[in-house]
Image (spheres, grey):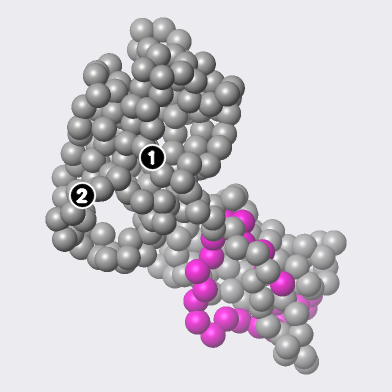
Amino acid sequence: MPNYVLVKTKSGLLNGLLTRFYTWKGNKPPEDTAGLTPIAESVSPYVSFIYTDRPHPNVPPEYFMIEWKGFLKVENPGKYTFYVISSDGCKLWVNQELIINEWYDQPSRLHMSREIKLLKGFHQVRLLYYNRLRFGEITLGWVRPDGGSETIPREHFYFTVSNKVFFTGLPDRYKIVVKPVGIEKVYQCLFAQGVCMISDLEEAMPVPANISVYNAENTLIYSTATPLEIWGGDEYMVKEG
């Protein structure tokens, strides 16, 4: 039986935050984006904006919402305090925990989170903002463990291009099994027309995962020696070594 190797051919992890724009009507803005359809999408290198007109060419200058979503890369572990400067409402989640919730009309104001202990590595981050009238301001910053405060720099923000991971290079009916470390759920797919796709990975990112490959007879032909860090949008090729 030949030996196989797994080669990453494309990374799905890119710099910046995925940015989605929405509109709303009425006296009270929606509490979240559930049920809303974005009218525009872009990538923001960081969050520090003053809007005197449209925040995007396809978005009106009033009654809009913006969602920034991605991952925060922490190089120095320790205790962090996050802050948001906003005119009108803002909500901030870190690792799916709501740490700032100031969802009301207001002039530009500083909002601080409680102190949070973060390990080195990637952490999920999501910022939601609404603006009612033409002027708007939004900034996302932190107070580092060393006491310094700043708008979070662009080199700390990442996002994934999708929640799918693709594998190529093997015949039909071969199988890929992805087992994230510390998570009970197992992901698997079968090759068809030279491609095997693992989907719905967002809930498991970012975690190390073990990858196993089985042939059409369900015999194990390859497994990773150590866990790999898998991101949505990654592309891999399985080939003979």
Please tell me in which quadrant of the rendered image residue 146 appears: bottom left
| Residue located 48% across and 49% down the image | 16
Q: Amino acid at mark 2?
A: Ser
Q: What residue is pinned by disc 1?
A: 47
- Residue nearest the viewer, comparing 234 with 184: 234
Q: Residues within 10 Å of mark 2 (few under 14, many from 20)?
A: some
Q: Amino acid at mark 1?
A: Val
Please tell me in which quadrant of the rendered image residue 65 appears: top left
* Residue 14 visible at all: yes
- Residue nearest the viewer, comparing 110 with 115: 110
In the depicted structure, whether residue 70 falls above or below residue 26: below
| Residue located 36% across and 37% down the image | 48
Q: Number of numbered discs present?
A: 2
| Residue located 66% across and 78% down the image | 6
In the depicted structure, whether residue 125 falls above or below residue 51: below
For marks 2 and 1, the one nearer the N-term is: 1
Name the mark on residue 215.
Answer: none
> Where in the figure is residue 145, as x and y percent of width and height?
18, 59
Left/right of residue 37 with respect to residue 118 in the rendered view: right
User: Mark 2–mark 1 contact, CB under 8 Å?
Assistant: no
Range shown magenta: 214-237
Q: Secondary structure at mark 1?
A: loop
Mark 2 and mark 1: span between their CA atoms? 15 Å
Q: What residue is pinned by disc 2?
A: 149
> Quick check: is 102 in the magenta stretch?
no
Quarter containing the N terminus: bottom right
| Residue located 18% across and 54% down the image | 148
